[in-house]
Amino acid sequence: MNSFEFYNPVKILFGEGKVDEIANEIPEDAVVLITYGGGSIKKNGVYQKVMNALKGFKVVEFGGIEPNPKYEDLMKAVDYARKEQVTFLLAVGGGSVIDGTKFIAAAVPFTGDPWNLLVGGKAFTVENALPIGTVLTLPATGSEMNSGAVVSRKSTQEKYSFGSPLLYPKFSVLDPTFTYSLPETQVANGVIDAFIHVTEQYLTYPDQAHIQDRWSEGVLQTLVELGPQAISNPLNYDVRSNIMWSCTMALNGILSVGVPTDWATHMIGHELTAFFGLDHAITLAIILPSLLRTMRDEKKLKLLQYGKRVWGIETGTDDIRVDKAIEATEKFFQSMGIKTRFADYGITIDQLKPIVERFKQRGWKLGENKTITSDIIEAILKGAL
Ligand code: NZQ
Ligand code: ZN
């Protein structure tokens, strides 16, 4: 196990009705900006519950944050927050609303063009940020309990992540009943996103991190067992609770302490969203199986462990067991109703060339061993046609 520091200050308010307690977590004299997406919170009653809980506060709002939040739209919220002299941000929604709100939090006090927070490197780290709280409505990204955010720019078809300890939410409300209204495809997206957050931190090479391995396997097994039930039995509180907490645990930092991490699937996936607008989880479901096949030698020991402990695969040669583990993974995504090949989305190899070119220009080397070059990315993309 590698040396590490672990810090996560997010207060979790978990359970039905917990939103009623948020007034205790926000300074009395705060000017609160509620941020939300395209309106699902108005249809399912979450908006009204949040407004009731904020009685007595000065509240303004900014809605319409799209999935894969866009810099161009978020800058409108930044202007508005400055004009209204907002002092606290409350994100009510999924990962896109929460990420967008983290960007707003960092951008409001920032001097200069806040896009530099995403692309400017170390010279533009977050030195100040408005405090934020979140009310989660879509278990998936873990953004409610981490300090990262991903923001896209329409004009250049780019999607980048950034982060800072200053962007940890002060609190996050996780009420499983708020997820009852999710469409099936968003439930599937969430389960698959969380599943692949775990594999990015687990399917690397053995590092004598026994407890982290067991935690990861526990989250994966829970998602495999309960993911399909969240779709077939959507109003089951226990199922929704376990899915919600699994998704948060998948990316709140606890699984990655002291172990190597990969993240290549995410980096390639972000480009697919930037170019084709595919949902985040769909990009991952396309890339991961092909990445595992391409990198199977480097990942062999962990793939064998994963096959045995998560899927019960114990017979056959090493090669056969690795094949079976990858196949089980891809089949699981498909069983959740998510298609895993580019052809399913009408995307051809020619359309993927600009992505390979972009990685070539950046010269990035991805993966736990930094061996995934643009040539290997090309092989991974071809393997997913
Ligand atoms: O916009 P509304 O009307 O709210 O509808 C949303 C949206 O259309 C809907 N939805 C959310 N909660 C609902 C609901 N519909 C009915 N009932 C509810 N309770 O779901 C749709 C998708 O929402 P979105 O927030 O885009 O999904 P998700 O949570 O999957 O977030 C995806 C974004 O998070 C980023 C992704 O890249 C993507 O931009 N990620 C953020 C990470 C982080 N901060 O740590 C890590 C992840 O790997 C990921 O990259
Ligand atoms: Zn993700």
Image: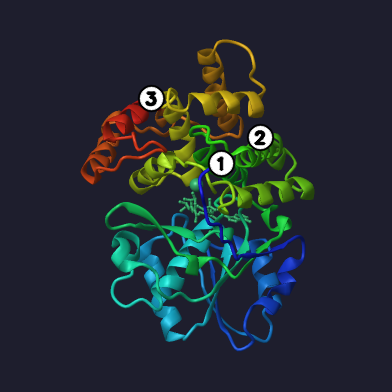
The answer to whether residue 102 is above or below residue 1 is below
Secondary structure of residue under mark 3: helix
Spatial distance from mark 2 to mark 3, Cα to Cα?
A: 24 Å
Name the N-terminal-most of marks 1 and 3: 1
Which residue is outermost to the left? Answer: 361
Instruction: Specify the amino acid type for callout 3.
Output: Gly
Give the residue number, with chain letter if any, for mark 2: 224
Residue shown at the point (46%, 64%) measured from the top left: 100
Q: Which residue is mark 3?
A: 383
- The residue closer to the viewer here, 231 or 363, is 363
Which of the numbered marks, if any, corresponds to residue 337?
none
Rendered position, 310 above or below 21: above
What colour scheme does the image use?
A: rainbow
Q: Identify the residue shown where x is 64% and y is 87%.
A: 28
Label 3 CA crowd tier, 10 Å (few <14, some 14–19, many 20+): some
User: For the residues marked 1 and 3, what is the alpha-carbon distance in whole angstroms?
Assistant: 22 Å
Q: Callout 2, which amino acid?
A: Val
Q: Could you tell me the amino acid type at mark 1? A: Val
Residue 126 figure quarter: bottom left
Q: Quadrant of the C terminus?
A: top left
The 10 Å Cα crowd at callout 1, few under 14, some 14 to 19, many 20 or more, is: many
